[in-house]
Amino acid sequence: AKEQGRNNCQLYTPEMNSKAFERLSLENDLRKGLEREELVLYYQPKVNVDDGQISCMEALVRWQHPTLGLVPPARFIPLAEETGLIVPLGEWVLRTACRQNREWQKAGYPPMQVAVNISPRQLQQGSLVEVVERALSDSGLAPRWLVLEVTESIMMDGTESTLATFRVLERMGIHIAIDDFGTGYSSLHYLKKFPIHALKIDRSFIRDITTNPDDEAITSAVITMSKGLNLKVVAEGVETVEQLEVLRALQCTHMQGHLFSRPAPAEQFAPVFGRAAGA
Ligand code: C2E
Ligand code: CA
Ligand code: CA
Ligand code: CA
């Protein structure tokens, strides 16, 4: 017990205090950053390797912090989820991504979908359908050009209300993709129950796919199952030509990863699209 008591005192070390303060100041900064439009969207293409076309652009948020520089989402999305800031942040992402895709369409680029990552909190909060409707109507983007990426956990904890929301979104014509497939508590039951359009095979299965037969077997099974269920399947984190070749042999046609492009600001894609549009 004495040992325990001593350990408890450790909670109040200056180090712990500074961590708590750092967190608090980051939270305040993020709140202000959202108001000051310090967030930026980067985009990463999903490529159809059969015809070389970009079928979709995934929006990935970054924070252009005044002193810390470009902050990756891993550093602030968890905090935003805990504090509830993810709701206004997620709305900003949706609105900005829809507007950007509409801009690309207006510029005459070949039409493609835009994908937005959705946190469980945004679904639980209840107004996701309204937020999506407003983002679409304000931007003028047709629903079929929007994909919402959710993780398996969303189907686990939300159940009936989540299912109801998904059904409304599906009826609106919006597509839903399961992100990081195979890393959560995947239940095949959910694939049957929820109106899903696509599965994204997590990067952890792709990383060693050329050397690890287990990864290849799992990926192959997911691809076959997806085809049987009429789901689009996307391999994430494709970095090498060797991985591309293995995936192609497994009949995977949609891929995303550094091999094709790292996430980049919207402007950087103009030359690529311009060429495709014949400009
Ligand atoms: P995610 O949705 O699974 O996104 C894929 C992540 O893998 C991105 O990291 C991307 O930059 C990275 N990536 C893509 N291709 C490759 C590759 O070939 N190799 C490697 N090593 N990495 C690759 P990023 O942009 O740092 O995003 C991390 C996570 O943050 C995302 O994972 C997503 O869960 C979350 N996130 C990003 N933007 C948003 C957002 O707007 N809202 C929400 N709720 N979450 C977001
Ligand atoms: Ca994603
Ligand atoms: Ca993913
Ligand atoms: Ca992820």
Image (tube, helix red, strand yellow):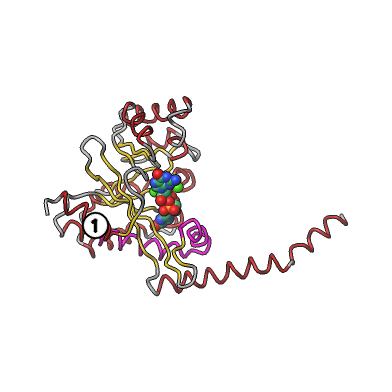
Kind of residue sitting beneath label 1: Asn
Looking at the image, which residue is at 43% across and 27% down? 216
Quarter of the C terminus within the rendering: bottom left
Q: Tell me if residue 41 comes above or below residue 196 in the rendering.
A: below
Provide residue 190's location: percent of width, then percent of height: 42, 37
Q: Tell me if residue 149 comes above or below residue 84 in the rendering.
A: above
Provide residue 265's location: percent of width, then percent of height: 32, 59
Circle 1 SS class = helix
Direction right: furthest residue: 2
Residue 57 makes an appearance in the image: yes
Q: Observer-nearest residue: 190 or 243?
A: 243
Residue 239, picture quadrant: top left
Q: Observer-nearest residue: 77 or 168?
A: 77
Residue 205, picture quadrant: top left
User: Majority secondary structure of the magenta segment?
Assistant: helix
Is 140 left, or right, of 236 in this rendering?
Answer: left
State the residue position of label 1: 101
Residue 248, picture quadrant: top left
Quarter of the N terminus within the rendering: bottom right
Provide residue 140's location: percent of width, then percent of height: 19, 61
Direction front: furthest residue: 241
Q: Observer-nearest residue: 243 or 81?
A: 243
Give the residues drawn in magenta, as a range: 72-100
Looking at the image, which residue is at 30% across and 48% down? 45
